[in-house]
Amino acid sequence: MNSPQTLKLKFVVTIGTVVTVFVALIFFWMFEQAKRGVIAQVDQQSRALLQQLLITRAWISDHGGVFIVKRPGVEANPFLPGTETTDTKGRTLLYRNPALFTREISQYADKVGLYRFRLTSLKLINPANEPGNFEKEALRYFQEHRYDEVKEGLAGEYIENGIRGYRRIIPLRIENSCLPCHEYQEYAPGDIRGGLSVYIPMREADKVIKRNRNVLIISWLGIICVVLGIIYFFLNSMVLKPVDQLHHVAQRLIEGEYSVRANLSTHDEFEAFAHAFNKMTDRLQKGYEGTIKSLVAAIEARDTYTKGHTARVACYAKEIAREMGLSAEMQAEISLGATLHDIGKIGIADELLGKSAPLTCEEVKIMAAHPEKGAAIIKEADFLLCALPAILYHHERPDGTGYPEGLQGENLPLVARIIAVADTFDAMTTDRPYRKALSVEEALREIEKCSGRQFDSDVVKAFRKAFEHDAFPRER
């Protein structure tokens, strides 16, 4: 049978798994959306850079190119003749067309690790502009389609030298201002002559993606802990605690404690179940009490002396237990044991039970077997096993001279020590066929004389105190 702890573990593991997976899926979707958002920003950056470069190239082209002052390290364009001239101050000026401007701007940007432009074509003028695999495929794709269909270009993530980046390439078409440089390649206005690409390293974008991922993971863990905590709190208070209480009540019923009840005020199915549970317990208790009454009635029907004896012994024993400060549960067990202590007499012959003359030695032996007979009667009844020590050992003595096992001292169960005093007191204060009853005071004195030998001294003291507190009548 699963314990409440096992049930709690199952609930926590099951609900925790469902919540964890569900929230994980939501956060994974959020992470993917955030990642796409970062990539979209990089894409917008690539579009803006290309558009800005196109505008700059158009301005240079519309003005017939630009001239720069020749300085150390600045060379003329080897692919265009007549690109050097001298100004009125005698300085050498070098011509820069849009293509060379693009390459030099790209080199400047690449030095600071920002981005890199690339002007390329399938019909090369400058071998340095030879297209890579991505660019070759894009250029072929551009040539197979009309400009209006491909003017947005192609883009995608790209790994170069182990570094992840984002590349976009757009088609370039021949304008009238382009013909002076490209007419010899047999281009006509409107033709796609190549492409302009930009490569943006994604180091910063990856940092943002990683940061977003870490934030989402921490948020995910935090939400999981909070949600599980809330679920466990309500689950524990609304489900597990009622189940735990019902389990506790059932366990005590199994142990024979039929007075226990389930007290639930949950105003739901658990409360209804507790009411049904209590009704079932009431029936069990009535059946339990009925069984005991039937057993007592069976004893009293066969032995006139026993009639009323068991009830009185139970009363005395319970008062002694109360005086000794024993728990209510222990008092109930002692009362039950006292009620059933002579049940073994059911197995004694009627002529022996009803004999008015003193018993012979053989008859005494037969009568002395009633504790073992009683133990044999109840051993199969689990709900009566708590009375077994009282039934089996109520004729044992602290000095070891009792029967059936000759137990002594602390080896003798307390319940048996208590019932021994109560049983003897009632026997001495009850008329028997072969002798008259002693008075209460006489019986008390006789018991106190045997304290420490036949009777437990602590039990005798408690019995005397109970008597002084008027726990039971002084005269019978």
Image (tube, grey):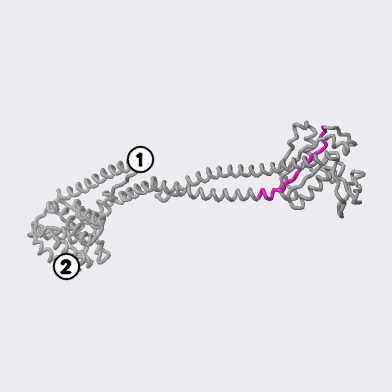
Name the side, left or right, on which 434 lies relative to 298: left
Task: Report the front residue among 269 and 86.
Answer: 86
Can you give x and y, in whole percent of width and height, for residue 423 in the image?
A: 17, 59
82 sits to left or right of 299: right
User: At 23% across and 61% down in the image, what residue appears?
Assistant: 325
What amino acid type is highlighted by mark number 2? Cys
- Depth check, front residue: 42 or 67: 67
Q: Residues within 10 Å of mark 1 (few under 14, many from 20)?
A: few
Vertical position of residue 70 compared to residue 442: above or below = above
Question: In this figure, which residue is indicated by the disc labeled 1?
Answer: 269
Q: Quadrant of the C terminus?
A: bottom left
The stretch of residues the image draws in magenta is 190-206
- Considering the numbered disc 1 on the image, is that residue within a helix, a strand or a loop? helix
**Residue at (79%, 32%) from the top-left corner?**
144
Q: Which residue is mark 2?
A: 450
- Examine the image and state in which quarter residue 417 appears: bottom left
Above or below, comparing residue 137 to residue 226 in the picture: above
Q: Identify the element where label 2 is drawn.
A: loop
Residue 329 on image: x %, y %: 26, 55
